[in-house]
Every structure is written in structure tokens, then in C-alpha cells.
Image (cartoon, rainbow, N blue to C red):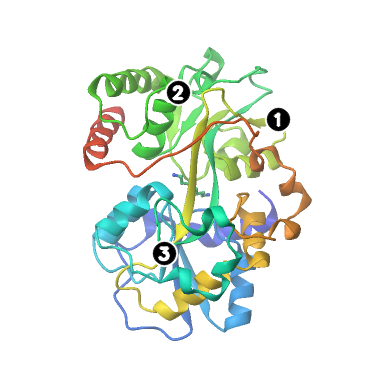
Amino acid sequence: MTPFRSLLALCLSATALAALPAARPAQAADPGMLHIFNWTDYTSPDMLKKFTKETGIKVTLDTYDSNETLLAKLKAGTTGYDIVVPSSDFVKIFVSQGLLQNADVASMANFKNLEERWKTRAWDPQAEYTVPWQWGTTSFIYDTKVYPGPVDSLETLFKPPAVFKGQVGMFGSPSEVINLALIYLGKPVCNSNPPDLKEVNALLEAQKPFVKVYNSDGIEDRMASGETTMHEVWSGDGERARVQRPTLKYVYAKEGGIGWMDNLAIPVGAPDVENAKKFMNFMMDPENAALESDFAGYQNAVVGSNKFLKPQLASAPEFNPPADYKITFAPGCPPAATKDYDRIWTLLRK
Ligand code: SPD
């Protein structure tokens, strides 16, 4: 981990999800403050400093590990957060449960800076609730020193060679693990077809002896230190791990992978909606979006940001999927599929 990132990790360890109170106490608007709740290792300290310098608004940051965790927190009641960052496949679930505010994003001054293809998105067709944050792909990374390969299939992750016994990391949330398993099996994602889910169940149970940990946090450290030698991963976290351990390789599998976009949104009950909107608008500026991409390792949706990127990221393989790579953007799973996923997950984690 670079000194820059270890500093952030140090700050975040104090706010790791396990140590979080169930919710920040509900509070009146705290003038000059913005409370952000975002995924772990996903918020550029330089970008936050610039935001505070330009607006005078101070920022607090707490972190979480999955959409499921964020959903549970928001459902439990007012959290005291002004900004949360749900993924594309969860935005509609949050909106349908009345957990997000309409922020009229399309009317914001910097909205014009978004790439045309991201101005409206399937999960927010009128650009009301969300601003694109970062997008990337989900696949896996492995250490070529441990297993020379070649590797071109998700089979290596789900039916690992013997050398990976007890060495594999998988994400810690049902939607992320089961949707990728369905891609490997050539089945539709968000699937509640019993025979398909039976196959998924068998696949994951057979993979289990190879799995050391189901955890979406700490992947970069585990892979950089060699604690795990293969891991399900998001592309940017894979890039960050590979920079530290150059023998790691992110796989663009022949079966394809999952695509997603994480999105800034304002939860119902946010203490300071105006500060939240200022932050949303700030993130649609090319230089600010590039600062964030440089830190996290993912693409953003802002035209003109690429010229501000570090060359190391701009040319990274994890940042540049091959043109013919099949990327499936998962839709929000219907309640029936979510229930089935939870059942498979509970059995797996016993
Ligand atoms: N380091 C955190 C990266 C967060 C990525 N979110 C991806 C969600 C995909 N469902």
C-alpha cells in the first residue's frame, strides 16, 4: 500500500463498518458539514480536500462493504448521512422503497459535462436521483507466480486448480457472488429459476473448500500481501493491488463479466440537502472526477476528465476492457430472486 493510501486506510479503520454505530444520531442541518457514507477505499482524500477548500464545507466519511449493508442501514431509519453511493443494480430498489430523495440532477449546472450515454441511465431514466460516481467491471484477479495459466475463463475462479486450495477470496455479498456465478454458467443474472439456482448452489458449495474468505473489504491488501492468491474483485481494486504486486493479473473471461456504475444519491432525512447537491455538482467537473478516478482506479462519466488522469491509470489493463469483452450490467434483482439469493447465501455461509 502506498503511504498515501495507508494514511487513508488508517483514517478509515477507525470508521470501519463493524465499528459504526447503527446510525449517526439524527441531527439538524450542520452548517458547513457534509456527511458521506461510501464504499471502502473509494473516496479520494485529495478530491475531498479540494471540495472543502473551494466550498468551505467540511466532510466526514464512513464506509461500508456492500449494497446490502447500505440498504439495511437506510431501512433501519435516518442515518445522518447526506450522500450515499448505491450501485446501478440497487438504485431502483432504494427508490422504490422511498429511501432516496429526488435531487433534480438534470438541472444541476455541471450536468452538461456528463457523457451523453450516461446522462440518463436505466436505473435513473430522468436523471432525478443520482449522479454517476465511478463505473467498472467485476471479474477476478490471480497471481501468475502461483499459477502461470493461461487463464481465460471464470472456470478458474469457480472450479479452481488445486494450487488455490484455501487461497481464494470471494466477495461478501450474495448479489455479487451469485450474479458472477450465473454469468459463468451462461444463465441470466437476477435469476430465480429453480434449476439454475440449484446449479449455482452446487457450484458455490464445491468451490467452498478453496475459499479462504468471503469479504468485499480489504481485497487490495490480501492480494498484495499474498494472503490470498486469487480473488473476485472489481476492476479498480484489482488495478490497485496489481500496482503493488505486479505478478497479479485481472482476467477478462471469455464468458464476460459484470458491469456496474456506483452513483451519488441523497438519502431521505439527509441533514443538509444543499451541501449534498453542491457535492454532486462538484463531482461532475472533469478535474474533480479525474482526481477520484486516479485514487480509486475506475472510469468516471465526465467528458474531458481523461486528460487529467495519471498515465499509469489511463493505460492500465483493468481500466481498459477489450472492445469485444461482454459486459452485463445487472438490472435490479426482483424480490423473488433476492429471496432465493439470500437462501443460497445463508446455506453457503453456515
Ligand atoms: N473499493 C470499493 C469499490 C466499490 C465498487 N462497487 C461495485 C459495486 C458493484 N456491484
Q: Image quadrant of residue 184?
A: top left
Q: Badge 2 local density, few (<14 within 10 Å), some, or many (20+)? A: many
| Residue at position x 27%, y 69% in the image | 78
Residue beneath label 2, please? 184
Which label's residue is closer to the chain start, 1 or 2? 2
Give residue 281's position: percent from left, percent from top: 53, 72
Q: Where residue 311 appears, x then y in whole percent?
A: 78, 50
Q: Please name the residue that numbered disc 1 is placed on.
A: 247
Q: Is residue 15 visible?
A: no
Q: Which mark is residue 137?
A: none
Q: Which residue is mark 3?
A: 265
CA distance for labels 1 and 2: 24 Å
Q: Is residue 169 left or right of residue 174?
A: right
Q: Are marks 1 and 2 in contact (CB under 8 Å)?
A: no
> Could you say whether the residue bearing mark 2 is in a helix, strand or loop?
helix
Within 10 Å of the Cα at label 1, are there few (<14), some (14-19), or many (20+) other Cα atoms? some
Residue type marked 2:
Tyr
Mark 3 or mark 2: which comes first in sequence?
Answer: 2
- Of discs 1 and 2, which sits in the foreground? 2
Labelled pair 3, 1 in contact (Cβ < 8 Å): no
Q: Is mark 1 within 8 Å of ligand 1?
A: no
Helix, strand or loop at mark 1: loop
Rendered image quadrant of residue 46: bottom right
Q: Position of residue 125 (x, y in %)?
A: 40, 57
Say which residue appears at 34% left-offset and 37% top-offset: 174
- Mark 3 vs mark 1: which is more N-terminal? 1
User: Does residue 166 show up?
Assistant: yes
245 vs 66, left or right, is: right
Q: Nearer the viewer, residue 115 or 287?
A: 115
